[in-house]
């Protein structure tokens, strides 16, 4: 009887631990769903883009506070502004897919939507590409980069210039991901090369899985 009790207790503890662990994708979807409920309570007609961004932030704030422990477990530190901005973008993309109130917000504010599209026209034109291959090197320095060998044996250099989804794991456990298969998302941008005295295209990481 005592043995059965111990087994049952261990099973319940293990089940509770598993349920407490929320995957990143599930967490983003859950936060998006709850943020959508908050947005649905608001009257968001006749707003400027700045006002809409403020209202979205206010709708998301209690959800972020509620799930701050799970966020930290998934690499989103509330004290890391860039990481939280990345999380906000992911929740925003999920809202665009699953939240009618979010889409209605833009339908009711066409001027604000037009203004946002004009401001972000260049960003919207840059769509990320992907490289699948083996992560063979992470090179530090003032400007860091990684090297990935694709299926044909070609080695690609992709620059680490800004925060991207998955960057925390490369910062904290780089050795764990070396010589492993990865998917790297990147965009190409023109940067000035002082040696060549010309602009050259470089690949810049936007995400890694």
Image (cartoon, helix red, strand yellow):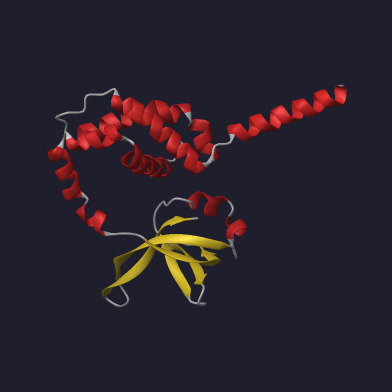
Q: In this view of the protein, which residue sits in the foreground, 40 or 53? A: 40
Q: Residue at x 16, y 39 (%)?
A: 112
Q: In the rendered image of this protein, does residue 59 appear above or below residue 93?
A: above
Q: In the rendered image of this protein, does residue 130 appear above or below residue 84?
A: below
Evaluate whether residue 77 shows in this view.
Answer: no
For residue 84, side relative to residue 137 (left or right): left
Evaluate whether residue 121 shows in this view.
Answer: yes
Q: Residue at x 35, y 60 (%)?
A: 128
Question: Residue 206 appears in which quarter of the rendering?
Answer: bottom left
For residue 155, side relative to residue 90 (left or right): right
Numbered marks: total: 0
For residue 137, side relative to residue 88 (left or right): right
Question: Residue 135 appears in which quarter of the rendering?
Answer: bottom right
Q: Quadrant of the N terminus?
A: top right
For residue 169, side relative to residue 162 (left or right): right
Q: Residue at x 49, y 36 (%)?
A: 71
Q: In this view of the protein, which residue sits in the foreground, 158 or 17? A: 17
Residue 119 in percent (x, y) is at 18, 49
Question: Residue 36 appears in which quarter of the rendering?
Answer: top left
Residue 55 in percent (x, y) is at 27, 29
Q: Residue furthest left?
A: 111
Residue 42 in percent (x, y) is at 26, 24
Q: In the rendered image of this protein, does residue 47 appear above or below residue 156?
A: above
Q: Residue at x 42, y 52 (%)?
A: 164
Q: In the rendered image of this protein, does residue 113 appear above or below residue 175?
A: above
């Amino acid at each position: 009887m005592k043995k059965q009790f111990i087994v049952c207790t261990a099973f319940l503890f293990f089940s509770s631990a598993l349920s407490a662990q929320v995957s990143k994708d599930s967490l983003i979807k859950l936060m998006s769903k709850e943020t959508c409920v908050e947005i649905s309570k608001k009257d968001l007609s006749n707003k400027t883009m700045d006002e809409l961004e403020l209202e979205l932030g206010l709708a998301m704030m209690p959800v972020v506070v509620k799930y701050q422990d799970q966020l930290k477990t998934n690499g989103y530190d509330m004290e890391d502004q860039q990481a939280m901005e990345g999380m906000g973008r992911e929740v925003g993309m999920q809202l665009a897919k699953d939240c009618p109130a979010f889409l209605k917000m833009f339908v009711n504010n066409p001027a604000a939507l037009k203004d946002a599209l004009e401001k972000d026209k260049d960003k919207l034109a840059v769509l990320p590409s992907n490289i699948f291959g083996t992560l063979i090197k992470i090179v530090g320095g003032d400007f860091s980069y990684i090297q990935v060998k694709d299926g044909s044996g070609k080695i690609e250099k992709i620059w680490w210039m800004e925060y991207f989804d998955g960057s925390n794991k490369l910062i904290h456990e780089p050795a764990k991901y070396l010589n492993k298969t990865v998917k790297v998302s990147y965009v190409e941008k023109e940067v000035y090369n002082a040696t060549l005295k010309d602009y050259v295209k470089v690949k810049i990481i936007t995400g890694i899985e």
